[in-house]
């Protein structure tokens, strides 16, 4: 672990318990953390704290017109985050979570969320990273966006994240090099099913789980 008065950095391979404790405290205090995911490194903040989410957006120099997605620990939590969850939506979630699939659904009206200038939808994912899911079990849902200043490449290491974000982050969690720059696939299932971004999970793979959900791209 390295530390100053303002920030801490942990190697989760050797100090996992201390890293979890420090990250949980930072989130509870409304601070931002940098955490590993199964794609790139992300900036995380308490999804239920408007000021924490604004801190995330400020760290990225990103406007409120681009609300961050929310990471959750378990597939079963999707119904608590969204409403009008269809059987097809659950089939996709069970097939690809934990994993690189971000699903947009209608947000539960009772959720106290201020992720930015959003509509009545929320983007949700369960990351395929055991350490991060354990952290999410402690903190609850986190608003998470790629660990970079808007317009710059997403961080593939904690060093890259730190060089861009500096002391706007309270805790850096180092899990070594990220798995690669290909992002998650984003699908909108809040109304007519649409693929907004085809990343690691392909249309063909999703249609194999729910035949015809996203149609034939060549039709």
Image: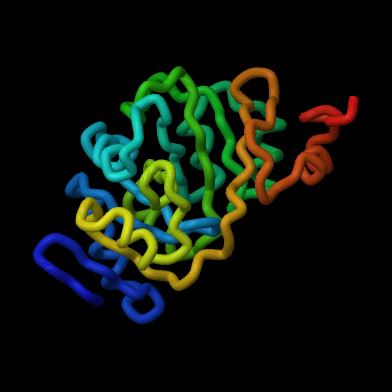
Q: Which residue shows up at 78% across the image and 29% down it?
A: 213
Q: Which residue shows up at 25% across the image and 64% down it?
A: 21
Quadrant of residue 179 in the image? bottom right
Residue 133: x, y in percent? 45, 57
In this view, 32 is above or below 62 = below
Identify which residue, 160 or 79, lies in the foreground: 160
Q: Which residue shows up at 26% across the image and 72% down it?
A: 18
Quadrant of residue 13 in the image? bottom left
Identify which residue, 182 or 114, lies in the foreground: 182
Residue 205: x, y in percent? 79, 46
Q: Which residue shows up at 60% across the image and 47% down it?
A: 184
Quadrant occupied by the N terminus = bottom left
Quadrant occupied by the C terminus = top right
Residue at far left of view: 5
Give the number of callouts. 0
Residue at far front of view: 151
The colour scheme used to paint the residues is rainbow
In this view, 57 is above or below 156 = above
Residue 25 visible in the snapshot: no
Residue 69: x, y in percent? 46, 38
Residue 150 visible in the snapshot: yes
Quadrant of residue 17 in the image? bottom left
Identify which residue, 40 or 122, lies in the foreground: 40
In this view, 125 is above or below 1 = above
- 106 with respect to 1 (left or right): right
- 113 with respect to 151 (left or right): left
Residue at far bottom of view: 14
Residue 197: x, y in percent? 64, 37
């Amino acid at each position: 672990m390295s530390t100053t008065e303002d920030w801490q950095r942990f190697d989760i391979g050797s100090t996992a318990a201390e890293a979890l404790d420090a990250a949980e405290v930072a989130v509870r205090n409304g601070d931002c953390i940098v955490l590993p995911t199964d794609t790139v490194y992300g900036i995380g903040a308490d999804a239920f704290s408007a000021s924490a989410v604004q801190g995330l957006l400020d760290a990225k120099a990103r406007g409120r017109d681009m609300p961050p997605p929310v990471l959750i620990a378990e597939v079963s939590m999707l119904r608590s985050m969204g409403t009008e969850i269809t059987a097809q939506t659950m089939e996709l979630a069970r097939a690809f979570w934990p994993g690189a699939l971000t699903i947009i659904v209608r947000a539960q009206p009772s959720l106290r969320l201020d992720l930015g200038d959003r509509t009545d939808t929320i983007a949700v994912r369960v990351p395929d990273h055991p350490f991060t899911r354990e952290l999410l079990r402690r903190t609850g849902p986190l608003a998470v966006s790629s660990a970079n200043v808007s317009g710059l490449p997403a961080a593939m290491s904690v060093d890259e994240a730190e060089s861009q974000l500096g002391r706007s982050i309270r805790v850096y969690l180092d899990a070594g090099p990220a798995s690669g720059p290909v992002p998650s696939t984003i699908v909108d299932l809040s109304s007519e099913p649409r693929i907004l971004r085809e990343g690691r999970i392909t249309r063909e793979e999703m249609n194999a789980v729910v035949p015809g959900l996203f149609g034939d791209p060549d039709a």
